[in-house]
Image (cartoon, rainbow, N blue to C red):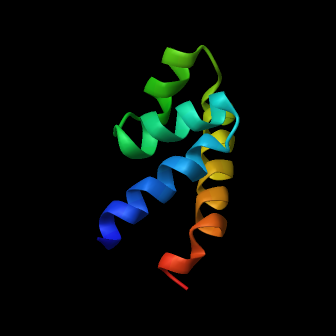
Amino acid sequence: MRASRLADDLAKVLAELPPKCREAFVLNRIEGWTQAEVAEHMGLSKNMIERYVMRAIEHVRDRLREYNP
């Protein structure tokens, strides 16, 4: 099933990210936390969270390009 494969591939791609980058992305884009909430939770600035999330988005987009060429 394509959705199941996508979920597996997404998990692998996220595992390639540095831990803080992955955590920021998961909390913000998957769990739905605001960047301010993520920043407070992780003890980092909102700007750093924004950078982590953008880096993760670019990584995921590049690695999963086959799903949306």
Is 9 drawn above or below residue 37 in the view shown?
Answer: below
> Residue at image x 54%, y 31%?
23
Is 3 drawn above or below residue 24 in the view shown?
Answer: below
Residue 3 in the image, given as x and y percentages of width and height = 31, 66
> Residue at image x 62%, y 49%?
56
Q: Nearer the viewer, residue 20 or 16?
A: 16
The outermost residue toward the front is 1
Q: How many marks?
A: 0
Q: In this view, does 65 lie to the left or right of 11?
A: right
The quadrant of the rendering that contains the C terminus is bottom right
Q: Which of 15 and 40 is in front in this view?
A: 15
Residue 50 in the image, given as x and y percentages of width and height = 62, 41
| Residue 24 quadrant | top right
> Residue at image x 43%, y 46%?
29
Q: Which of 27 and 37 is in front in this view?
A: 27
Is 47 drawn above or below residue 60 in the view shown?
Answer: above
> Residue at image x 34%, y 37%?
31
Residue 52 in the image, given as x and y percentages of width and height = 66, 40
Q: Is residue 31 left or right of residue 25?
A: left
Residue 32 in the image, given as x and y percentages of width and height = 34, 40
The outermost residue toward the bottom is 69
The quadrant of the rendering that contains the N terminus is bottom left
Q: Which of 52 and 64 is in front in this view?
A: 64
